Image: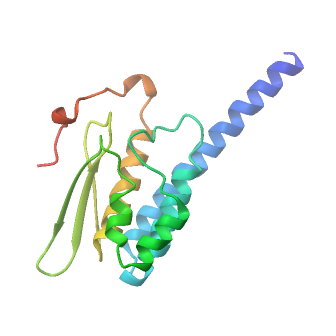
Amino acid sequence: MNRSDLHHEAGIVAAADAAAGWRRHLGELALACAGSFPAEEAQRLHELRRLLAEAPAGVLIRGLCVPDADRLDQQIAAGAAASAALAMLGEECGYLLSRGAGGQHLASVILPGAAEEASASGDTLALALVGALVLALAEIDALEPRRVERRSPGRASRLN
């Protein structure tokens, strides 16, 4: 094995480590959203924005938008955390939002190419949506790129 091959292999290992760390952070953020209080939604939105901006090369995040940090701050300051979370979903993403009589919010998200939606609950709509989005990302990122099917928006598997 020559030096060039060793550098190539080291690059592949480093990329795999970065992707694994990124996926671990997705899981941590999903758990954090489920246990967060309404006062923590701004922090969770910033964490999601950071993860989207730092997605490793090759990670399947198509269909999502990385908002400008200043714009995100403006929306949060204006009390529009739910709008800030929705702004991270692109036009090809499907979503379903609901709120129970007890005040618990539920969000389901399906990303382009995914076979099923991911759902999460939270104390606010923004927390539920961030949780569902990171779960959806973790699910689609786990798929082999060759197994991802491109579906038209009308052919999604679910989303009631």
Residue 71: percent from the left, percent from the top?
48, 65
75 vs 23: above or below:
below
Q: Residue furthest right?
A: 3
Residue at image location 31% in from the left, 27% down from the top: 150
Q: Is residue 81 above or below residue 57?
A: below
28 sits left or right of 6 in the view: left
Residue 81: x and y, percent?
37, 72
As drawn, 39 above or below 65: below
Q: Who's the residue at 38% across and 65% down the image?
A: 84
Task: In this rendered view, identify the residue nearer to me: 87 or 51.
Answer: 87
Location of residue 68 in the rendering, given as x and y in whole percent from the top left corner: 52, 58
Of 2 and 84, nearer the camera is 84
Residue 127, by quadrant, is bottom left
How many numbered tags mark residues here?
A: 0
Left or right of 73 in this view: 154: left
Q: Is residue 25 above or below residue 117?
A: below
Specify the quadrant that holds the N terminus: top right
Residue at the image point whose x is 80% and y is 19% from the top:
5
Question: Residue at position x 70%, y 35% from top?
Answer: 13
The percent coordinates of residue 41 (x first, y second) are: 41, 75
